[in-house]
Image (cartoon, grey):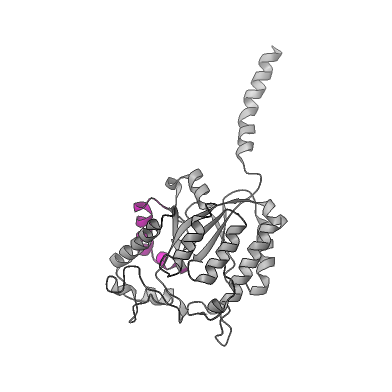
Amino acid sequence: MRHVALLMILAIASPSASSAAQTPSRPELLIRIDDIGMNHSVNMALQQLADTKMPLSASVLFVCPWYQEAVDILRKNPQITVGVHLALNSEWKWYRWGPVLGKEAVPSLVDTVGYFFPSSDEFLAHKYDLGEVERELSAQVERALRSGLKIEYVDFHMGTAAGTPELLAVAERIAAKYQLGMSPYFGEAEYSLFDVPIAQKQSAFRAYVDSLKPGPVNLAVIHVAQSTPEIRALVDMNNATQNTATGAPLMAQHRQAELDMLLQFARGPQSKKVTLVNYAAVIARLGRASMKRPATQ
């Protein structure tokens, strides 16, 4: 009789024990580094982060000339999940890029010189053709696939390709066509340091990590670069917070600060407070069928 009673107790207790075992004891943090492939300075920062062996997700600007160097780095670092940073803008003064398909194929997406418009507002105010948007963004994904890298997801450079419900529907069709995930469509709680003052980035990120709790995946969107002469010359024509009041560029300092912040995080005790995941792991666990358009999109 005692034996039967013990079995009944174990049967009742087992589901709870199983549920507890499945609940993460530490919060999950997904670090997404954007604008990879933009230039050599950004790629060298990617290399430094790759050397830490942290699982990361890298959103690559396959429209930029330097994407090929990024591909070479990423090919050697399978711990980094690769996504396509779908681009409809080219925001830097003196350093511009245009569509993969060329200006003649998608004339409504470019300025008079053949480059993408520098700001989201300018693009959205222009009479762009949705068919051209779909063809160009598809071409960016196809270039990524031809690189030989395993592509897992897409997201939006400067948010422009998610700027209207119609544009977002185009991006969703492209993700479905190529069987890719979308960031942030997996219930992620998103955080960015883009506009945080340079001197406050370290402390802001420490406070952010300390505040995390087990539950939905926490997505930190980060922009990194080595502060070299190449990138210090770039003036942001889209976001005034990246320049001084007189228009001098601050972007290189912002991105170097975020790089230093992540390198310190990788070496320090804070990385032990969270479980680091990348999009490959999230998609494998949740499946693309679980994707849902965020309320903020």
**In the rendered view, does 255 fall on the left or right side of 99?**
right
- In the rendered view, tell whether residue 113 sits above or below residue 225: below
- Residue located farthest toward the bottom when viewing the structure as drawn: 246
The picture places residue 247, in percent across and down from the top left corner, at: 54, 85
Task: Determine if the magenta segment contains residue 44.
Answer: no
**Residue lying at 43% horizontally and 54% vertically, measured from the top left:** 151
**In this view of the protein, which residue sits in the foreground, 219 or 17?**
219
The picture places residue 63, in percent across and down from the top left corner, at: 40, 68
**In the rendered view, does 266 fall on the left or right side of 93?**
right
The picture places residue 293, in percent across and down from the top left corner, at: 44, 55
The chief SS type of the magenta part is: helix
Query: Which residues lie in the magenta part?
Result: 158-180
**In the rendered view, does 42 fall on the left or right side of 129?**
right
- Residue located farthest toward the top when viewing the structure as drawn: 1
Task: Determine if the magenta segment contains residue 179.
Answer: yes
**Residue lying at 71% horizontally and 58% vertically, measured from the top left:** 268
**In the rendered view, does 35 fall on the left or right side of 256?**
left
Q: Can you tell which quarter of the image residue 10 is in?
A: top right
**In this view of the protein, which residue sits in the foreground, 215 or 93?**
93
- In the rendered view, tell whether residue 129 sits above or below residue 179: below
**In this view of the protein, which residue sits in the foreground, 215 or 100?**
100
